[in-house]
Image (cartoon, rainbow, N blue to C red):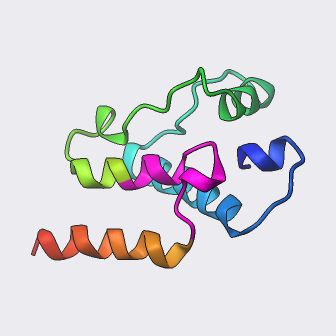
Amino acid sequence: MSPEQLSKKKLDARSDIFSLGITLYELFAGKHPCDGQDSREIMRQIRSSKYKFEPPSKHNPEIPRQIDQIILKALRRRPERRYQSVTEMLLDLSRVSASRI
């Protein structure tokens, strides 16, 4: 769940982008970006700006820096600082893909 969803604020597509960021983090890093012992602690970490998400490459050094940046942008707590659309996120992902060919 996104920070705004946990705080019972108005939701839009950017909440889904946060959830996609969580999924991509788990896919690339092999673990959830939060290290809480239970769901309550994980929810607190998601909402708190004091808890910093580590780059996925810390857990998998084969991840390119650009992928770290994309995932961490999707995980920004303030929706206005996140990707504003999935299309915007896909454009960045396609640039990484094109640069590796």
Residue sitting at 54 percent across and 47 percent down? 75
Question: What residue appears at the point 67 percent right and 35 percent down from the top-left corner?
Answer: 46
Q: Quadrant of residue 18?
A: bottom right
- Quadrant of the image occupied by residue 37: top right
> Is residue 17 depicted above or below 79 in this figure?
below
Give the side of residue 97 with respect to residue 91, left or right: left
Number of on-image labels = 0
The question of residue 89 being in magenta is answered with no
Rendered residue at 26%/54% (across/down): 66
| Residue 39, above or below 10 | above
Quarter in which the C terminus is drawn: bottom left
For this rendering, which residue is in front, 42 or 76? 76
Q: Is residue 26 left or right of residue 39?
A: left
Q: Is residue 83 magenta?
A: yes
Residue 5 picture location, percent across and down: 81, 50
Q: Is residue 57 above or below residue 89?
A: above
- Residue 62 seen in render: yes
| Residue 35 image offset from top left, x and y in percent | 57, 25
Nearer-the-camera pick, 22 or 30: 22
Outermost residue on the left side: it is 101
Q: Which residue: 33% across, 69% down?
A: 93
2 or 39: which is nearer to us? Answer: 2
Q: Nearer the viewer, residue 69 or 100?
A: 69
User: Which quadrant of the structure image shows residue 55?
Assistant: top left
The picture places residue 82, in percent across and down from the top left corner, at 54, 55
Position of 81 compared to 19: left or right?
left
Highlighted range, magenta: 70-84
Residue 63 in view of the camera? no
